[in-house]
Amino acid sequence: MKSDIKFDVQSSRDYSIYIDELKELSFSRKVAIITNPKVAGFHLQTLLQGLKVDALFIITVPDGESYKNQQTLDLILENLFNHQFNRNDTLIAFGGGVIGDMTGFAASIYQRGINFIQIPTTLLSQVDASVGGKTGINNKFGKNLIGAFHQPQAVYIETQFLETLPSREFGAGVAEIVKMAVTFDADFFSWLEEADLKSRKDLQVAIRKSVETKAYVVSQDEKEKGLRAVLNYGHTFAHVIENLTGYKRYLHGEAVAIGICMANDLSVKLGLLTKSEAGRIKALLERYGLPTTYKIDDIEDFYQHFFLDKKTDNAKIKFILASTLGGNVIKDDITKEDVITVLDGYCTCNSINSLYFTLPRTSQLHLTNLSI
Ligand SMILES: NC(=O)c1ccc[n+]([C@@H]2O[C@H](COP(=O)([O-])OP(=O)(O)OC[C@H]3O[C@@H](n4cnc5c(N)ncnc54)[C@H](O)[C@@H]3O)[C@@H](O)[C@H]2O)c1
């Protein structure tokens, strides 16, 4: 399938995204592949078969989000210095979003910027993380708090690498595909309802549509001053859920699936989406084994967690909502009452709703004071 998607990122350079076209890659200079033992074990041999390069270095870092940190970054940079990489050499990120983000960040700061190529191997990284140039690492204050915008030279998406991906990881990628369709492309959403993403042919189409959407959004707003924020649909709720569950119970995409359902409930409440449209989105997510519900123990605590999100600006919570299928709106003026009504639908506690609405309007409500 010919899928050379070119896009122009404002103030940065163009690059191409290829889907299932990686046959041979040639470099006349040094190349370092950054990967982890799991991905290397499954797929490095396949990648090496098509690689022609003067001098190749393989840097393997431990697997997992907990290693997306300064220490691992330092190890990568040290290796590059030891092997005397310079600005004309290239890094290849070969793995999921963790490897992609970390390699991209190393590339952005090594000698003030070196070329890098993305070869994403999870569905989430193929449809989302590898495109758009957001790079970074985590620290003790939170996720992706240290980073840079640094666009790759090219992105090579190979669906064959997904054959070894566990089904939960596959589902997590589907959540991001659904996100793109719901907020930008109603036809794509209707197509997804009929498609079977377990088939290679349909999967290629879904990846291409998602990547085109992401490329369009990034080309309009590389540094997330406006439109790019729409890609955080479902994420305002998801970040709270991930935080409250210690980043252990759900994969990111799974938390996003629940977050999408919560955001849709808010859209329905505000008259932006019909109940039937919200039901169709939920059904699509569930078809790929994604969770769509979550039990909230303490509504006020959940609400206060919105303010920990780095995207919460000036104490205003930003909600990205679907407004009809294929449309989106960013709102930062939704009343606490409306949000609480939605959260109440997920609450394990009884009769908070009626108690809550007898209380006066106030910016600080402590539902924990209520004995239930
Ligand atoms: N830069 C962006 O725009 C952006 C967007 C979304 C997410 N992210 C980041 O991406 C990261 C999440 O990415 P992810 O979901 O790919 O997780 P991940 O990179 O941790 O990969 C998930 C797991 O799958 C394994 N894996 C990777 N490819 C595999 C394959 N082909 N077969 C079998 N196992 C494989 C990995 O080793 C890992 O254990 C987060 O750090 C998030 O912050 C970045």
Image (cartoon, grey):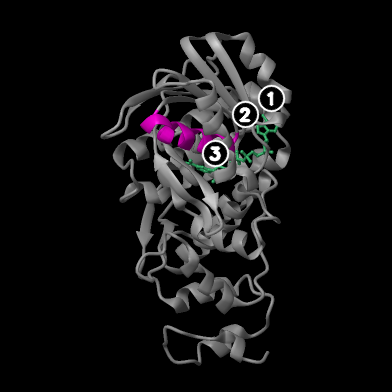
The front one of 272 and 15 is 15
Region of the chain picked out in magenta, as a range: 96-113
The front one of 249 and 57 is 57
Could you tell me residue 199's position as x and y percent? 65, 27
Question: What amino acid type is highlighted by mark number 3?
Answer: Leu
Q: Which residue is mark 2?
A: 35
Q: Which mark is residue 73?
A: 3
Q: Is mark 3 within 8 Å of ligand 1?
A: no
- First in sequence, mark 3 or 1: give its number: 1
Question: What amino acid type is highlighted by mark number 1?
Answer: Ala
Quarter holding ligand 1: top right
- The image quarter in which residue 164 lies: top right
Say whether residue 255 is visible.
yes
The front one of 48 and 239 is 48
Q: Distance from label 3 to label 2 (Cα)?
A: 13 Å
Q: Main secondary structure of the magenta part?
A: helix
Could you tell me residue 283's position as x and y percent? 63, 50
